[in-house]
Image (cartoon, rainbow, N blue to C red):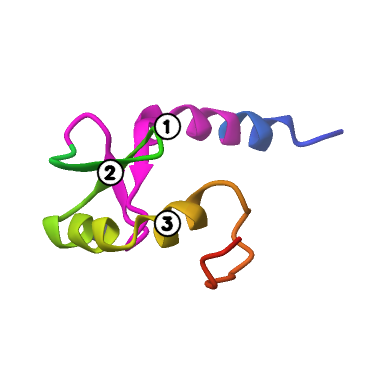
């Protein structure tokens, strides 16, 4: 006999998780989740739009976009900060 009851209970709770998380972009400066649809601070770099939670984050990105853009795409977070790779 298997505990079929407990399994079906878990499936139910998984259905309740909202799927809005999918549309969240990540602030490359502070790593906070930012809603792409309501984001007030955005910046474009090399054809990619980046979203920020605050004007200070956008300003930080604009000063050195290569540093933050490379950490979120391309090389999968190898932690290098030389700026040449
Ligand atoms: Zn931020």
Q: CA distance from mark 3 to mark 1?
A: 25 Å
* Mark found first going from the N terminus, 3 or 1: 1
First to last magenta residue range: 10-38
Where, quadrant-wise, is the C terminus in this rendering?
bottom right
Marks 3,1: beta carbons within 8 A: no
Q: Residue at x 17, y 34 (%)?
A: 38
Kind of element beneath mark 1: helix
Number of the label disc, if any, that sits on residue 51: 2
Q: Is residue 4 magenta?
A: no
Ligand 1 location (quadrant): bottom left
Q: Classify mark 3: residues with Cα within 10 Å, few (<14), some (14-19) or many (20+).
A: some
The residue that disc 3 covers is 66
Marks 3,2: beta carbons within 8 A: no
* Mark found first going from the N terminus, 3 or 2: 2
Number of the label disc, if any, that sits on residue 22: 1
Kind of element beneath mark 3: helix
Where, quadrant-wise, is the N terminus in this rendering?
top right
Q: CA distance from mark 3 to mark 2?
A: 15 Å
Q: Is residue 42 toward the left or the right of residue 78 in the image?
A: left
Q: CA distance from mark 1 to mark 2?
A: 14 Å
Q: Is residue 6 toward the left or the right of residue 69 in the image?
A: right
Residue with the most extreme right position: 1
In the image, is residue 43 above or below residue 37? below
Give the foreground label among 1 and 2: 2
């Amino acid at each position: 006999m298997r505990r079929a009851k407990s399994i079906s209970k878990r499936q139910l709770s998984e259905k309740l998780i909202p799927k809005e998380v999918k549309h969240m972009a990540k602030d490359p400066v502070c790593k906070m989740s930012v809603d792409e649809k309501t984001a007030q601070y955005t910046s474009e770099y090399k054809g990619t739009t980046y979203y920020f939670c605050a004007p200070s984050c956008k300003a930080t990105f604009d000063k050195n976009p290569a540093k933050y853009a490379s950490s979120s795409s391309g090389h999968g977070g190898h932690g290098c900060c030389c700026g040449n790779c």
